[in-house]
Amino acid sequence: MKNDIKEYAIRQAEFRPGFEDFVAFTKEQNSKLLIVSGGIDFFVYRLLEPFDIAREDIYCNGSDFSGERIRITWPHPCDRFCNNDCGCCKPSILRNYDPEKSDRIVIGDSITDLQAAKLADQVIARGFLTEKCRELDLVYKPFETFYDVIGILKQRQEELV
Ligand SMILES: [Zn+2]
């Protein structure tokens, strides 16, 4: 059962072009890349397996297969500043990084990225997140592929110098 679900999830998933180069780019730049997903650990880990990303940098929901049914666990709940009942709480994870010491960039496409986007120094958005940013007058840069993201990050570095 578990394997069927895994295989199904893997087959359905695809990465936007340039993801591998993007991961390599963050390493070259010594930027800390965190993957934060509302997905479940077994398929998130499996999907990310081909890429050079440490487990501790992957935040997602957990799963317990010991019983009759799969039980979802929530290892990254909302902190006291968030009451959105997120499950895997993106703003809480971002708050672990001191804004004084970090340039906090949020790349996302979903409503679940919005609260983190509000805290970010730079938002790189596509899909529904761009609509939300426009609605709330949040500044963002649009992307379609991870090659776009690399371009935006390079441009940001030049602007920050
Ligand atoms: Zn939350």
Image: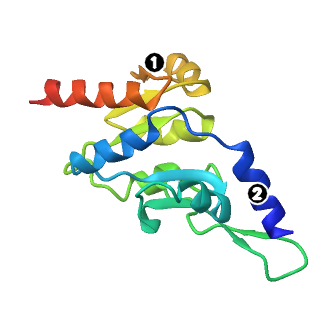
The amino acid pointed to by label 2 is Glu
Q: Residue 67, located in which quarter of the rendered image? A: bottom right
Query: Picture coordinates of residue 6 (x, y %)?
Result: 75, 60
Query: Picture coordinates of residue 36 (x, y %)?
Result: 51, 52
- Give whichever of 1, 143 is nearer the camera: 1
**Are the two marked residues, 2 and 1, in contact with CB atoms closer than 8 angstroms?**
no
Could you classify mark 1 by the number of other residues whose Cα lies within 10 Å: few (under 14), some (14-19), or many (20 or more)? few
Q: Residue 141, located in which quarter of the rendered image? A: top left
- Residue at left offset 47%, top offset 52%: 35
Q: Does 39 appear above or below 20?
A: below
The mark found on residue 7 in the picture is 2
Could you classify mark 2 by the number of other residues whose Cα lies within 10 Å: few (under 14), some (14-19), or many (20 or more)? few
- Give whichever of 129, 68 is nearer the camera: 68
The amino acid pointed to by label 1 is Asp
Q: Quarter of the image containing the C terminus? A: top left
The mark found on residue 137 in the picture is 1
Query: Picture coordinates of residue 53 (x, y %)?
Result: 42, 59
Q: Does 55 appear above or below 138?
A: below
